[in-house]
Structure formats: structure tokens, C-alpha cells
Image (spheres, helix red, strand yellow):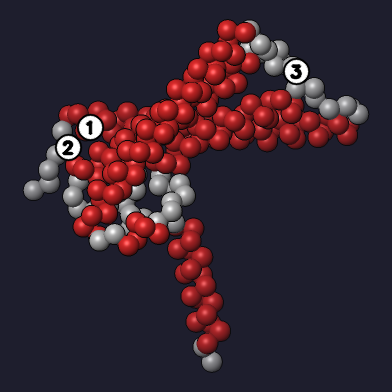
Amino acid sequence: MTKRPSPFMHVLNRVDTGLSWIEAFIVAGSMLVIAINTIANVISRYVLSHSLYFSEELNEIFMVTVTFVGLGYVTRKGRHIRMSAIYDMVPEAARRYLMAFIALTTAAVMFLLAWEAWEYVAKVAARGRVTPAMQVPLWTTYVGVVVGLVLTGIQYLATVWVNLARRESVWISHEETDAYDDPELITLLEMQEEHDKRETTP
């Protein structure tokens, strides 16, 4: 008989799914704006003989947003870079607890960085500085840094929880286990195997 998730877990999963959609929308939307802005700037430069005055500044703002908001999304999908030399030498039974410890310390670092970023944003807002080209409040361009770091910290806390609550595997994120394989890498390996078979077939 399948165990039904608790009401708390149901709500937590719904919230996490909503955050995932929001992060994906922000990252995809930001990349789309960057692409449209860059194309428009090139057309303006070669057709109208002058560049859009705000183009470079706008791209910089959205690149910061993509970098930090995308950090939480990458962490959720287990796509972040891992240094596993020591981890691989640990007995399999203890890896879950080591992963929980790694995720907990990483979450602490993320929240510390978020706090430092928040203090910086507050200082910039207090000074009333604006961006040179678009003249928008400078602090608004750094909000994505704080949001991204907080969301990433939450994802690492979820990784801690899932490793301590579930005992069937080691979880590198709230959604992915340590057995997770990159689908793109799997596809390339399968294509290579098929190519090798064709080469060796007489």
C-alpha cells in the first residue's frame, strides 16, 4: 500500500513547484529580453547609425538576475558543480549524512551571503543612487542577488531535510538522487555506442 504524503509535505511540494515555475519564468524571460535587446541594438547600430543608449546597461541588469535567480533553479535540479573526491571515498551508508552536512554548511554560506547582499542593497538605496543610462534606482538592479541567494539556501535546507527524512537513497537536491545522470550526457554516450557498433559491423 502506497504511503500518502502528509498535508505538510503536500503544501511544501506545491510551494516548491510554484517557486520552480517562477524561477524558470524569470530566467527564461530574462534571457529572452537579453536576446531581443541585443538584436535591437545591432539593428539600430547598422540601420540608424547609433546604438541604443540603454542596451548595455539593460543586459548587465538581466545577466545579474539570470546568474543568481538561476542558481536556485540549478540547485533544485542537482546541476551544480560538486567536488566529490572525499565524498566518493566515504562508505555508502554514511554518504547521506555527509551530503546533509555539506548541504547544511552550504545553506549557511548562502544565507550569510544573502545577508551581506541585503545590507549592501540597503546602503545603495539609502544613498539614492541611480543607473547612468536608464536612471532607475540602482538598488533595484541588485534585488535579484538577494532573492537568488535566499532561494538557493532554501533549496540546500530542503536537501538536508530529504536526506535525513528519506532513507532509501542519497539526495543531491530536493528532487534528484545521487544516481541522477545528465540526460544530455546519456544521449551522447548512446549515440557514441551506436556509432561504434556501425563502425565494427562488417
Residue 27 visible? The answer is no
**Residues marked 2 and 1 touching at CB (< 8 Å):** yes
Dot 2 crowding, Cα within 10 Å, few <14, some 14–19, many 20+ = few
**Residue reaching furthest to the right:** 49
Task: Determine the secondary structure under disc 3.
Answer: loop
In front of the other: 145 or 115? 115
Q: Residue 54's image quarter?
A: top right
Report which residue position mark 1 lands on.
10
In the picture, measured across the screen, residue 56 lies left or right of residue 196, that is right
Report which residue position mark 3 lands on.
133
Report which residue position mark 2 lands on.
5
Residue type marked 3? Ala
In front of the other: 50 or 97? 97
**Residues marked 3 and 1 touching at CB (< 8 Å):** no
Residue 92 visible? The answer is yes
Task: Determine the secondary structure under disc 2.
Answer: loop
Look at 75% across and 17% down and name the residue there.
Answer: 133
